[in-house]
Image (spheres, grey):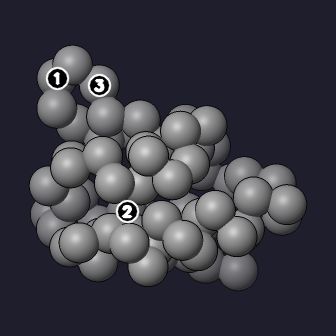
Amino acid sequence: MKIVVDFDKCKSNAVCMAVAPDIFEVRDDNFLYVLQEEPPEDRRPAVEEAIRTCPTGAISVEG
């Protein structure tokens, strides 16, 4: 699984970070950073929840 973020859509609102702080981080510069572009499979439920809860639909996965 590879996380893909459409940074043109992303508003860095940190909803994904609240769901999976080990994978997503919004830093002081107000930009989203993906800490693990290819997280382990056991994190898939958290990644899928981040995808569902993203208000702009900016997150997706490949694989």
Q: Is residue 52 above or below residue 23?
A: below
x, y (%) of residue 60? 47, 75
> Which residue corresponds to mark 3?
27
Asked if disc 2 and disc 1 are in contact, CB closer than 8 Å, the reply is no
* Disc 2 residue type (three-letter): Val
SS at circle 1: loop
According to the picture, the residue beneath numbered tag 1 turns out to be: 29
Residue name at image x 20 percent, y 73 percent: 56
**Position in image of residue 5 (x %, y %):** 37, 62
In this figure, which residue is indicated by the disc labeled 2?
A: 5
Camera-side residue: 63 or 27? 27
Give the residue type that dot 3 points to. Answer: Arg
Is any atom of residue 53 visible in this view? yes
Along the horizontal axis of the image, is 45 left or right of 4? Answer: right
The residue positioned 82% from the left and 54% from the top of the image is 40
Is 9 situated left or right of 40 in this image?
A: left
| Residue 37: % across, % down | 60, 50
Instruction: Decide which of tag 2 and tag 1 comes sooner along the chain.
Output: 2
Horizontally, residue 34 falls left or right of residue 14, namely: right
Q: Are marks 1 and 3 in contact (CB under 8 Å)?
A: yes
Residue 47, x across and y down, in percent? 59, 64
- Residue 58's image quarter? bottom left
Name which residue lies at 85% across and 60% down: 42
N-term mark: 3 or 2: 2
- Quarter of the image holding residue 44? bottom right
Q: How many other residues sit within 10 Å of disc 1, few (<14), some (14-19) or many (≥20)?
A: few
Alpha carbon separation for disc pair 3 and 2: 16 Å
- Outermost residue, top direction? 28
